[in-house]
Amino acid sequence: MEAQVRKFLVVVDKTPECKVAVRFAARRAQHTDGRMTLLCVAAPVDFQQWGGVEEIMTDEAHRDAEALVYDAAKIINELTGLTPELIIEHGEAAECLMELIRRDRDISILVLAAGTSKDGPGPLVKLFATKVQAIPVTIVPGNLTDTEVDELA
């Protein structure tokens, strides 16, 4: 019987703690012969007065998401030699994340880093820590240094 390869999923966004989640998942994937998937969600555009302007704003949101996910993939590749799967979705982050987890049965672990601001750990951490039990979740402190992540992972 062949062992299943772990597939780590990280949601890539503009938060500072995202880099911690990416590094932790990359190191875990490296140490366990796993794979990685990066999801970046382009937020929906709420502008419907002129179709052309809405299309431009949607294209810009997609380009921003591409830049974020490519930057994270570059870090992973330079750090570990792994080439992650890249996914860009359009919509609300929680909905896109849940749909990806439903759709891709190979995803083994969701890795999130908790925010360090006074606003709490972040909406996805709150959601997966309290309500959603769809997949195992690793939540790492968002204020870890690279050295601390490397030692922990």
Image (spheres, rainbow, N blue to C red):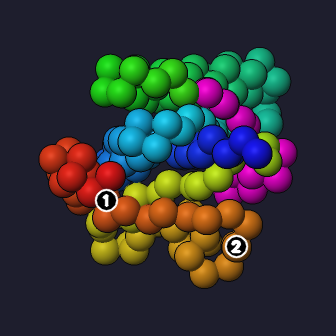
Q: Is residue 100 above or below residue 64?
A: below
Q: Are the residues tagged 2 and 1 within 8 Å (C-beta)?
A: no
Residue visible at 31% across and 59% down in the picture: 142
Q: Is residue 83 left or right of residue 80?
A: right
- Dot placed on the residue nearer the N-terminal end, 2 or 1: 2
Residue visible at 51% across and 21% down in the picture: 83
Percent from the top left, x then y, of residue 146?
20, 45
Amino acid, disc 2:
Val
User: Along the line of sight, which residue is nearer the eye, 142 or 133?
Assistant: 133
User: Along the line of sight, which residue is nearer the eye, 141 or 123?
Assistant: 141
| Bounds of the magenta segment | 85-103
Q: Is residue 7 left or right of residue 12?
A: right
User: Along the line of sight, which residue is nearer the eye, 3 or 50?
Assistant: 3
Q: Is residue 141 above or below residue 73?
A: below
Residue visible at 61% across and 27% down in the picture: 86
Residue visible at 61% across and 71% down in the picture: 127
Residue with the mark numbered 2: 132
Q: Residues within 10 Å of mark 2 (few under 14, many from 20)?
A: few
